[in-house]
Amino acid sequence: MDVILRIFWGFLSTVLFGGLLGLGLAVASRKLKVEKDETVEALDGVLPGLNCGACGYAGCGGYAEALAAGKDEDLTKCKPGGAVALAGIGKILGVEVDTNAVRMVAYVHCLGKEGVASRSYNYEGLEDCNAATVLFSGDKDCKYGCLGLGSCMNVCPTNAIRKTGDGLVVVNPDLCISCGKCVDICPTGVMRMIPEDADFVVACNSRDKGKLTKSNCKVGCIACKICEKKFPEAGYKIQDNLSILGYDNRGPGRAEAVEKCPAKCIIPYREVKIEEASSAG
């Protein structure tokens, strides 16, 4: 009988202790509860949740807090979220926004693959473009081209960048979230952002004079000015020995310039076959 009573009182004391502990925790949770800002929660809800850092904050939550507190008035910093996120932010904050802007995607402005661009030596170090540039700014004679070692691939949060298998890399625009991390890390500046609805691209980044560019790469822009002079309304402008194509005013002659370009460095956008490049990566 004594054994049964001891078991009963032990069980009862355990139940009472558990109940009191639970009650204490419930009271503590109410007293110590951190009230969440509903605006911050709403903003965080319309952001993509990638926490890629493209906005300049550690994550989507940080950007949401800055917007809600008025510490950051730039509503367009979430490039991965695009028009959907921008519209949501504007609605929550009661601000009119323009959601018609064309999404920007990364593009490698270089056609200097193996056998096309000359190399001064064979780099056999760490598989990273920034590491390669420590030694004579890379092994290519053209110091503006794609080194193809994949610094951009290492920072891409969506695996949108793949090696082509012939010494270059290519960006899949359908996977690109416009974060710009690849552009920031590229040591040669060959990776730049262009509109996703681009029609043509000048696939060269060389700022060398024409003669030197031609000796370094068979398809490098030699700044001959044919595209600029023969097709003045097409949007081609020679700047720093390189043809720069504008995308705001797409006048007549853009396609014709492709045919007239002696270096053949002006090409239709998406000419590189993404599927083949993906299998090579």
Image (cartoon, helix red, strand yellow):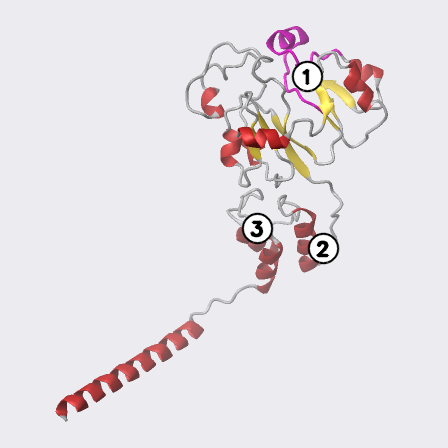
Mark-to-mark CA distance, 1 and 3: 37 Å
Tag 3, which secondary structure? Answer: helix
Extreme residue toward the bottom, this view: 1
Residue 126 higher or lower than 102, as above or below: above
Residue 225 higher or lower than 20, as above or below: above
Numbered label attached to residue 95: 2
Residue type, label 2: Val
The residue wearing badge 1 is 240
Could you classify mark 1 by the number of other residues whose Cα lies within 10 Å: few (under 14), some (14-19), or many (20 or more)? few
Residue type, label 1: Asp
Mark-to-mark CA distance, 3 and 2: 16 Å
Q: Quadrant of residue 16?
A: bottom left
Residue type, label 3: Tyr
Residue 204 higher or lower than 45, as above or below: above
Residue at 33 percent of width and 81 percent of height: 19
Residue at 63 percent of width and 48 percent of height: 81
Magenta region: 201-224
Q: How many marks?
A: 3
Q: Is 208 contained in the magenta span?
A: yes
Numbered label attached to residue 12: none
Left or right, 156 with reference to 106:
left
The residue wearing badge 3 is 63
Q: Position of residue 142 (x, y in %)?
A: 58, 14
Q: Is 51 contained in the magenta span?
A: no
Left or right, 122 with reference to 13:
right
Tag 1, which secondary structure? Answer: loop
The answer to whether the residue labelled 1 contacts the one labelled 3, judged by CB atoms less than 8 Å apart, is: no
**Nearest the camera: 241 or 2?**
2
Could you classify mark 2 by the number of other residues whose Cα lies within 10 Å: few (under 14), some (14-19), or many (20 or more)? few
Q: Quadrant of residue 203?
A: top right
**Nearest the camera: 95 or 232?**
232
Tag 2, which secondary structure? Answer: loop
